[in-house]
Image: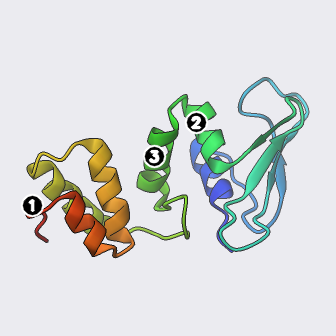
Amino acid sequence: MYNLFADIVEAELGTPVNKNGDFTISSPFRNDSNPSFRVYYPKQENDYGSAYDFGEGVAYTPISFIMKYKNISYGDTIEYIYTNYGVRLGGDVEHKDTNLNNKLKIILRYNQVDDKLMEKAICHYMKNDKMVLDSLIPNKLHL
């Protein structure tokens, strides 16, 4: 099973982690003399891992962790995780085709599609939902 949370912790904090099980590290949100930030291995498919900060009494998902750690919005967090980790949250875990994704963004920007509509179009394209995609950007999208 893919442990997205472990990848995020390792990349964002620069901390080598156990990607095949639970692990505990010092909290990235406060001075933690005794490691109390526990990252849990996914329990089932479409589970991205989770964490609990025992010092704060707060549970985290990959989304809530990035939102707090980077101090960014929910939408920006979804895009950040998708761009940096190749995972589209809110559906099945899918690794992106970077080349195709970049081509699609270039085409959408060329056609002056705003960022909100672009994200929606990319999600539908990655789901192979061509009918919805065509309705979002009629007569403009050409791959």
Q: Quadrant of the C terminus?
A: bottom left
Of marks 1 and 2, the one in the foreground: 1
Residue 109 position within the rendered picture, expressed as x and y whole percent measured from the top left:
15, 49
What is the C-alpha distance between the residues marked 3 and 1?
Answer: 26 Å
Amino acid, disc 1? Lys
Q: Give the quadrant of residue 107.
A: bottom left
Residue 139 position within the rendered picture, expressed as x and y whole percent measured from the top left:
8, 64
- Between discs 2 and 3, the one toward the N terminus: 2
Q: Classify mark 3: helix, strand or loop.
A: helix
Disc 2: CA contacts within 10 A as few (<14), some (14-19) or many (>=20): some
Could you say which disc has been placed on residue 123 in the image?
A: none
Could you say which disc has been placed on residue 67 in the image?
A: 2
**Residue at 58% from the left image edge and 43% from the top image edge:** 12
Residue 54 position within the rendered picture, expressed as x and y whole percent measured from the top left:
89, 36
Q: Give the quadrant of residue 99.
A: bottom left
User: Residue beneath label 1, please?
Assistant: 140
**Residue at 69% from the left image edge and 48% from the top image edge:** 61
The tally of labels here is 3
User: Residue beneath label 3, please?
Assistant: 80
